[in-house]
Amino acid sequence: MLLIPCPLCGLREESEFTYGGPRRDLPALAGQADAAVWSKALHMGHNPRGALRELWYHGSGCEAWIEVTRDTVSHEFHPGGAE
Ligand SMILES: [Zn+2]
């Protein structure tokens, strides 16, 4: 069982959360990026070995979206988005 560090609730079991995917830095809105840039940003995800910033929804707890860093090899979680 994985334990995820919610900044509002403390360490909680993974089953209380819904995975929101990796955090993405999307291109600017309103004509500042063309379709190819958007397509790459949305569909060509980064799949690193090691630290990955992710979003999780704590639906069975505080109902907040949180950002954590998970090591994709060991599955260790670290609070916040810092790598
Ligand atoms: Zn929480």
Image (cartoon, helix red, strand yellow):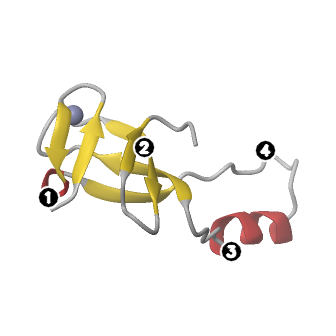
Q: Is residue 54 above or below residue 81?
A: below
Task: Determine which residue is flagged by label 2.
Answer: 68
User: Dot 3, how many residues are within 10 Å of its Cα: few (below 14), some (14-19), or many (20+)?
Assistant: few
Q: Are marks 2 and 1 in contact (CB under 8 Å)?
A: no
User: Dot 2, how many residues are within 10 Å of its Cα: few (below 14), some (14-19), or many (20+)?
Assistant: many
Return the disc, 2 or 1, that comes first in the chain's sequence. 1
> Which SS class for mark 4?
loop
What mark, if any, has residue 81 been given in the picture?
Answer: none
As rendered, which of 14 and 35 lies closer to the eye?
14
Q: Residue 35: image x %, image y %?
A: 82, 68
Q: Are marks 4 and 3 in contact (CB under 8 Å)?
A: no
> Which SS class for mark 1?
helix
What mark, if any, has residue 28 been given in the picture?
Answer: 4
Of the residues shown, which amino acid type is indicated by label 1? Ser
Q: Residue 11: image x %, image y %?
A: 19, 38
Return the disc, 3 or 2, that comes first in the chain's sequence. 3
